[in-house]
């Protein structure tokens, strides 16, 4: 029987089977912070107002739906498999290593803490006793920006390297693991990236990119680069906790990826909402509360 694309396209139906793993993932109760603290390292460079809502414990006005859960679903599967492989490969490895800051305000878990003795060829240049490893899965846009791929023109240019917020997140964890565990010294963070959309064989040939480089990048970040970013972010989160402790929700401010510029967000901007607001679990509450600093007792979130 002759079959054209139109006939095949017409066989599409709303999913009743294939999405069930994602649905189950989306229906999981929100993950508590690693140590039950008000904030988490993974919110590094996040919107201060949103961090404030979470710290107060308001219920999300816009909880994650199935469509939003896809990226986190893939990321969790990749993390679990990669961590299993790391445990089977190296000695002296811990995965999901928790820590918290000195004020018990921020916590999180490192993807991996690995003894430097596993890397005898590099041990003199790595320094310290351990490396802290963090993995990010990402789509084509973020990965290509980081490594410099230009798929349209089949070129590889200089990339931007990993996002500073990822460095700050891992760095906060490293600082507090060292604080909690005398004897552990972390000089290097190792930030891994896995792209969910690898370069095709034809593109990799044209761009002269081989093997695992088609979808994986790894960055070894020395302490003099990561520590200042981590310390600045610990201080910013401490200020948010202080505001909340005094009964106020902060303004709608994020740190740009240069790590310094503070940007005020407007979820109702006539140019379109910033991406942070598109993905924010407190969007309706924030819109109702309006801009500026808000008294917690006057927030719409008190009605939730
Ligand atoms: S909607 Fe935007 S400005 Fe408001 S809390 Fe969320 S991220 Fe911040």
Image (cartoon, rainbow, N blue to C red):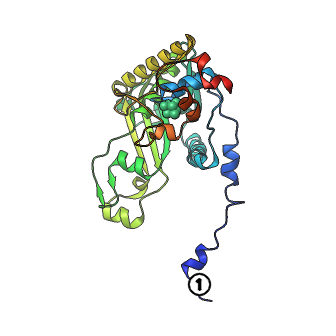
Left or right, residue 92 beside residue 225: right
126 and 151: which one is in front?
151
Left or right, residue 133 beside residue 98: left
User: Residue 53 is drawn in which quadrant?
Assistant: top right
* Residue 149 locus on image (x, y percent): 34, 53
223 and 288: which one is in front?
288
10 and 77: which one is in front?
10
* Residue 255 locus on image (x, y percent): 40, 28
Residues packed near mark 1 inside 10 Å, few (<14), some (14 to 19) or many (20 plus): few
Query: On screen, 55 above or below 207?
Result: above
Q: Which residue is mark 1?
A: 3
* Residue at (68% x, 49% y) in the render: 23
Left or right, residue 125 beside residue 80: left
Q: Which quarter shows the N terminus?
A: bottom right
* Residue 250 locus on image (x, y percent): 49, 20
Query: On screen, 196 above or below 63?
Result: below
What is the number of callouts on the image?
1
Which element type, helix, strand or loop, lies under badge 1?
loop
The residue at label 1 has a CB less than 8 Å from ligand 1:
no
* Residue 278 locus on image (x, y percent): 51, 41
Hey, which residue is sitting farthest top in the picture? 246
Query: On screen, 63 above or below 168?
Result: below
Q: Is residue 139 visible?
A: yes
Q: Which quarter shows the C terminus?
A: top right
* Residue at (38% x, 36% y) in the render: 220
Q: Is residue 131 visible?
A: no
* Residue at (63% x, 34% y) in the render: 61
């Amino acid at each position: 029987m002759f079959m054209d694309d139109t006939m095949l396209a017409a066989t599409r139906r709303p999913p009743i089977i294939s999405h069930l793993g994602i649905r189950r993932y989306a229906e999981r109760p929100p993950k508590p912070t690693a140590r039950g603290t008000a904030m988490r390292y993974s919110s590094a460079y996040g919107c201060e107002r949103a961090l404030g809502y979470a710290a107060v414990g308001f219920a999300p006005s816009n909880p994650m739906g199935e469509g939003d859960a896809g990226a986190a679903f893939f990321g969790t599967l990749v993390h679990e498999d990669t961590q299993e492989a790391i445990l089977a490969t190296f000695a002296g490895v811990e995965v999901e290593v928790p820590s918290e800051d000195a004020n018990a305000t921020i916590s999180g878990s490192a993807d991996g803490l690995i003894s430097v003795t596993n890397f005898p060829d590099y041990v003199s240049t790595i320094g310290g006793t351990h490396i802290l490893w963090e993995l990010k899965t990402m789509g084509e846009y973020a990965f290509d920006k980081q490594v410099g791929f230009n798929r349209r023109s089949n070129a590889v240019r200089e990339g931007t390297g990993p996002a500073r917020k990822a460095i700050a997140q891992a760095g906060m964890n490293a600082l507090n693991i060292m604080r909690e565990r005398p004897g552990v010294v972390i000089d290097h963070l190792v930030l891994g990236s896995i792209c969910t959309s690898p370069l095709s064989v034809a593109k990799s040939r044209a761009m002269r990119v081989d093997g695992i480089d088609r979808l994986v990048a790894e960055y070894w970040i020395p302490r003099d680069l990561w520590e200042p970013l981590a310390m600045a972010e610990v201080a910013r989160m401490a200020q948010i906790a202080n505001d909340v402790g005094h009964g106020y929700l902060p303004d709608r401010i994020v740190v740009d990826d240069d790590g310094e510029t503070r940007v005020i967000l407007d979820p109702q901007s006539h140019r379109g909402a910033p991406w942070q607001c598109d993905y924010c679990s407190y969007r309706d509450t924030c819109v109702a509360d309006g801009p500026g600093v808000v008294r917690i007792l006057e927030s719409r979130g008190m009605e939730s």
